[in-house]
Image (cartoon, rainbow, N blue to C red):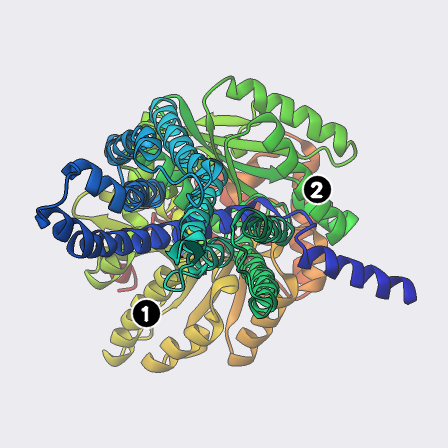
C-alpha cells in the first residue's frame, strides 16, 4: 500500500511538471490550442502596435517635423520613434496568417500567398537593423547590442522559418501546415526579446541633473517585460518544466542584466520581492493551465476514442469508417479503380463462439482485425459481430484473401473457419462509402454460397440484381399500400380422396415497373433488411379479408396456411401482431395455419419455443415447413410441438434410386403419426409420387398435380 502511495505521488509529480509522455492526441490538442492562442496573440499585437504607431506619430513625429529647428530627415525621425512598432506589427501580421492558415484558410495556394506576403514584408523590416546602430548613438545608457540583435535576429529567423515551411508544405502537400512547435517557440522568443528591449530602454533611461546622470522617474519600469513574460507563459502552453526553464532563466537573466549593466543602479529592494512573487505566481499559473489542458485533452481523447473506435478490435467504428472514407474520396487522394471496398465475414465464427466460449471468440475477432491490418492495410472497421468493412488499395486482392485464409486456419486448426470476401471496386466519386460497402456485401453473398474461392467481385449482373433488391426494400411499404403484393393460393388436397381441403398462401409481387416478381427474388432481401414481417402480416391480412368475405357471404371457407419467416420471430413480436389482425377480422383460429420454415430452428430456440407455445395457446396450428431439407433432426420432433410436418417432394426425390430412401421416409411419416403429428407433402407433380405418398400414409398433398398457386378468384371457383 505504501508502495502504491509513493508510486501515485511520484506519478502526480511527473504529471504536474510535464515529465510524463503525452499521447499523440494530447500533443496535437496542446499544439492546436497554441495555434489558436497564436491567432489571438498576434491580433493583440496588431491592435496594440497600430495604436502605438498613431500615438507616436501624434506625440513625437508630427511635433518634431513641424518644429523649424529640426534638422533630421523624416525617415530618421520616423525610424527613431517607431522602428520597434513597425517591426512588431509586421511580425504580428505574419504570425496571424501563419496560425490562421493552419486551420481556417482553405486551399493550399491561398494559404501560401497569405503567409508569404506578410512574411516577406516582415523580413524586409529586419533589414533595417543597421539603422539602429547608425541612429542610436547611446553609448552609455543605450540598449545593449545583444538585446537589439536578439530582437531583429529572432524576427528574421521566424520569418525565414515560416517561408521555408510554407513553401515546403505547398510543394509536398504535407498535412501539418507549419511545424507548430518551432513557430510558437520563435514567436515566444520574439515577444520576450521585445519585452526585454523595451523594458531595458525604459529602465535604463536617465536624465542629467546638475551635470549628474540620475534615473529618469518617468520611465522607471519594466512592465513591458513582465507583460511579455505573462503573454508567453499563460497564453502559450508549454510543458511545465519548459515554462519553468524559460520563465526562470529570463527572470534571473533580466534581473542580472539590469543589476550589473544599468548605472546608476536602481532596482529597489521592495520591487525585488514583488519581482520574485511575480515569477512564482506566473510559474504556478503556467502549471495550472497546463494540467487543466491535459486533463481536458485526455477526456476529449477518451470521448473521441469511444466515438471512433471499435473497443474490441481497436479498428475504426463503422460510423467513423464511413465518414472518414467519404472524406478521403472527396479529397481526391484516391483514384478510381485503384481502391476497393471489401466486406468480410467469417463463416464458422458461431462454431468457435459456441465451442470455445465468448472470450476465445473475442480473441479470434481481434486476431482477424490484426491480420486484416497486416495483410490489407488501408481503412478497416468492424461493422458488426464478425463482419468487417475495408477500403483498401486494389492490389493483389485475391492473393491476400488466400494468405489471410491460410493464416486463419493455422490459428484455428480445428474449426478451420472460412473468411469470405465481397469486393466492390471504387469507381464513383459521388457514391457514399456506405453504398460501396453495401455492394461489397452484396457480392459477398455470392462468395458465401460458392464452395470454390473465398471472394466475389461485384459485377454487372450483380448490379441489376442489386438494383432490384434495393428497389424491393425501398418500396415494400408502397407495394403493400398499392396492393402490388398479391396472395396466390395453391390447393392442398386430402390424400385419401384427393378432395380440396385448403390452400397455402404464396405471395406474388406484381410490380408496375418490373412485372411479376417471384418470392424467391424478394423474400430473402426483405429478410436481410428485417422488413419481412410487413409482407407476412400483409399476406395474413389479405387472407383474413378473403375469409371474412366468404363467411359474410354465408359460405364455409377452407383453411389457409400462411408463411412466416424465421426473421419475424427475431425482429418483432409476431405472435401479438398475428392475434391483432385475426381478431380484427374475427376469424376462427381453425381456419389459419402458421407455417414456419425449418431454418428458424437455427436461431434462438427458446424464443421460438415460447412463440409456438403462445400460438398454441391462442388456438393456432403451427406447421413446420421444409422438414428434412436442412438442419432438422428427430430432436426437433421431441423439442418442438409442431402440428404438421411439411415435406418437400423435391427434397425426397433427391434420395433418387437409393432403396433405403423409401424406408426412411416411410418411418418418418409413421413416427409422426405415432406422435400425433400430421403430415403434408408438397411439390407433388406426378401420379406415381402421389400414389407412393398415399401408400406410406402421408395425409395431405400439395403440388402442380393438383394446382399451381393461382389468384383468389381461380381458387374460389374450385370450391363451387
Ligand atoms: P415454400 O413455402 O416452400 O413454398 C413452396 C414453393 O414451391 C412455392 O414457390 C410453390 O409455388 C412451389 N411449388 C408448389 N408446388 C410445386 C410443384 O409441384 N413443383 C415445383 N417445382 N414447385 C412447386 P414460390 O411460390 O415461388 O415460393 C417460394 C418460397 O418463397 C416459399 O417456399 C416461401 O419460402 C417463400 N414465400 C412465398 N410466399 C411467402 C410469404 O408470404 N411469406 C414468406 N415469409 N415467405 C414466402
Ligand atoms: Ca410454405
Ligand atoms: Ca416448403
Task: Tell me residue 551's x, y (percent).
Answer: 29, 78
| Number of residues whose C-alpha sits closer than 10 Å to that of mark 2, classed few (under 14), some (14–19) or many (20 or more) | many
Which numbered dot is residue 64? Answer: none
Image quadrant holding the N terminus, namely bottom right
Task: Tell me residue 340's x, y (percent).
Answer: 42, 28
Q: Disc 1 marks which residue? A: 541
Please tell me whether mark 2 or mark 1 is closer to you in this view.
2
Please state if 541 lies on the left or on the right of 421 as rendered. Answer: left
Q: Disc 2 marks which residue? A: 364
Please state if 543 lies on the left or on the right of 684 as rendered. Answer: left
- Can residue 376 be spotted in the picture? yes
Image quadrant holding the C terminus, namely bottom left
Between 718 and 204, the one lying in front of the other is 204
Task: Tell me residue 126's x, y (percent).
Answer: 33, 32
**Looking at the image, is mark 2 or mark 1 earlier in the sequence?**
2
| Number of residues whose C-alpha sits closer than 10 Å to that of mark 1, classed few (under 14), some (14–19) or many (20 or more) | some
Between 272 and 521, the one lying in front of the other is 272
**Residue at (13, 53) in percent of width and height:** 63
SS state under label 1: helix
**Residue at (25, 75) in percent of width and height:** 549
Q: How much space separates mark 2 and mark 1, taking CA atoms?
A: 46 Å
Figure check: 335 above or below 309: above
**Residue at (33, 26) in percent of width and height:** 170
**Residue at (27, 40) in percent of width and height:** 106
Residue 562, quarter of picture = bottom left
SS state under label 2: helix
Q: Are marks 2 and 1 in contact (CB under 8 Å)?
A: no
Please state if 1 lies on the left or on the right of 72 as rendered. Answer: right
Q: How many marks?
A: 2
Amino acid at each position: 500500500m505504501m508502495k502504491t502511495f509513493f508510486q501515485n505521488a511520484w506519478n502526480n509529480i511527473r504529471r504536474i511538471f510535464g515529465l510524463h509522455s503525452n499521447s499523440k492526441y494530447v500533443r496535437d490538442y496542446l499544439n492546436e490550442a497554441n495555434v489558436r492562442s497564436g491567432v489571438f496573440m498576434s491580433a493583440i499585437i496588431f491592435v496594440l502596435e497600430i495604436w502605438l504607431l498613431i500615438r507616436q506619430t501624434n506625440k513625437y513625429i508630427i511635433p518634431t517635423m513641424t518644429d523649424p529647428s529640426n534638422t533630421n530627415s523624416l525617415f530618421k525621425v520616423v525610424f527613431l520613434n517607431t522602428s520597434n512598432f513597425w517591426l512588431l506589427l509586421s511580425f504580428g501580421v505574419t504570425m496571424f496568417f501563419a496560425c490562421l492558415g493552419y486551420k481556417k484558410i482553405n486551399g493550399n495556394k491561398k494559404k501560401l500567398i497569405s503567409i508569404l506576403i506578410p512574411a516577406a514584408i516582415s523580413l524586409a523590416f529586419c533589414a533595417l537593423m543597421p539603422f539602429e546602430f547608425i541612429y542610436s548613438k547611446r553609448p552609455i545608457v543605450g540598449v545593449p547590442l545583444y538585446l537589439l540583435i536578439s530582437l531583429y535576429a529572432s524576427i528574421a529567423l521566424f520569418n525565414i522559418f515560416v517561408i521555408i515551411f510554407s513553401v515546403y508544405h505547398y510543394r509536398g502537400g504535407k498535412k501539418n501546415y507549419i511545424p507548430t512547435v518551432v513557430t510558437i517557440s520563435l514567436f515566444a522568443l520574439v515577444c520576450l526579446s521585445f519585452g526585454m528591449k523595451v523594458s531595458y530602454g525604459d529602465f535604463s533611461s536617465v536624465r542629467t541633473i546638475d551635470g549628474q546622470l540620475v534615473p529618469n522617474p518617468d520611465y522607471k519600469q519594466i512592465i513591458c517585460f513582465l507583460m511579455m513574460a505573462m503573454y508567453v507563459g499563460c497564453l502559450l502552453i508549454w510543458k511545465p518544466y519548459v515554462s519553468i526553464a524559460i520563465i526562470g532563466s529570463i527572470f534571473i537573466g533580466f534581473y542580472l542584466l539590469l543589476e550589473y549593466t544599468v548605472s546608476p543602479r536602481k532596482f529597489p529592494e521592495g520591487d525585488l520581492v514583488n519581482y520574485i512573487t511575480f515569477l512564482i505566481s506566473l510559474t504556478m499559473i503556467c502549471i495550472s493551465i497546463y494540467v487543466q489542458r491535459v486533463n481536458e485533452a485526455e477526456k476529449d481523447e477518451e470521448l473521441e476514442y469511444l466515438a471512433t473506435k471499435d473497443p474490441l478490435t481497436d479498428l475504426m467504428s463503422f460510423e467513423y469508417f464511413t465518414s472518414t472514407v467519404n472524406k478521403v474520396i472527396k479529397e481526391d487522394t484516391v483514384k478510381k479503380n485503384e481502391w476497393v471496398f471489401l466486406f468480410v465475414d467469417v463463416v464458422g465464427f458461431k462454431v468457435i463462439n459456441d465451442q470455445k466460449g465468448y472470450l476465445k471468440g473475442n480473441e479470434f475477432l481481434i486476431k482477424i482485425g490484426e491480420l486484416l491490418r497486416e495483410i490489407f492495410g488501408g481503412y478497416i472497421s468492424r461493422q458488426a459481430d464478425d463482419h468487417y468493412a475495408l477500403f483498401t488499395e486494389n492490389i493483389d486482392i485475391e492473393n491476400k484473401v488466400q494468405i489471410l485464409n491460410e493464416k486463419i486456419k493455422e490459428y484455428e486448426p480445428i474449426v478451420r473457419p472460412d473468411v469470405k470476401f465481397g469486393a466492390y471496386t471504387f469507381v464513383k466519386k459521388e457514391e457514399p462509402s456506405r453504398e460501396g460497402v453495401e455492394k461489397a456485401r452484396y457480392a459477398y453473398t455470392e462468395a458465401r454460397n460458392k464452395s470454390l474461392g473465398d471472394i466475389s467481385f461485384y459485377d454487372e449482373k450483380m448490379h441489376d440484381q442489386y438494383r432490384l433488391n434495393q428497389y424491393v426494400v425501398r418500396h415494400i411499404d408502397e407495394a403493400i399500400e398499392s396492393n402490388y403484393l398479391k396472395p396466390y393460393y395453391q390447393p392442398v388436397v386430402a390424400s385419401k380422396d384427393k378432395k380440396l381441403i385448403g390452400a397455402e398462401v404464396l405471395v406474388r409481387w406484381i410490380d408496375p415497373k418490373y412485372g411479376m416478381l417471384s418470392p424467391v427474388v424478394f423474400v430473402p432481401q426483405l429478410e436481410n433488411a428485417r422488413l419481412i414481417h410487413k409482407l407476412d402480416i400483409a399476406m395474413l391480412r389479405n387472407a383474413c379479408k378473403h375469409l371474412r368475405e366468404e363467411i359474410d357471404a354465408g359460405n364455409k371457407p377452407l383453411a389457409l396456411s400462411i408463411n412466416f419467416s424465421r426473421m419475424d420471430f427475431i425482429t418483432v413480436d409476431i405472435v401479438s401482431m398475428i392475434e391483432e389482425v385475426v381478431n380484427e377480422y374475427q376469424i376462427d383460429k381453425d381456419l389459419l395455419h402458421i407455417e414456419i420454415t425449418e431454418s428458424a430452428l437455427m436461431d434462438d430456440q427458446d424464443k421460438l419455443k415460447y412463440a409456438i407455445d403462445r400460438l398454441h395457446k391462442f388456438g393456432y396450428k403451427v406447421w413446420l415447413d421444409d422438414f428434412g431439407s436442412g438442419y432438422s433432426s428427430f430432436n426437433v420432433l421431441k423439442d418442438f410441438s409442431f402440428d404438421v410436418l411439411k415435406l418437400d417432394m423435391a427434397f425426397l426425390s433427391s434420395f433418387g434410386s437409393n432403396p433405403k430412401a423409401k424406408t426412411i421416409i416411410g418411418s418418418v411419416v409413421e413416427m409422426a403419426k405415432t406422435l400425433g403429428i400430421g403430415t403434408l407433402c408438397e411439390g407433388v407433380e406426378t401420379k406415381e409420387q402421389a400414389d407412393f405418398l398415399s401408400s406410406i400414409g402421408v395425409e395431405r398433398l400439395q403440388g402442380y398435380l393438383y394446382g399451381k398457386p393461382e389468384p383468389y378468384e381461380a381458387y374460389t371457383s374450385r370450391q363451387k
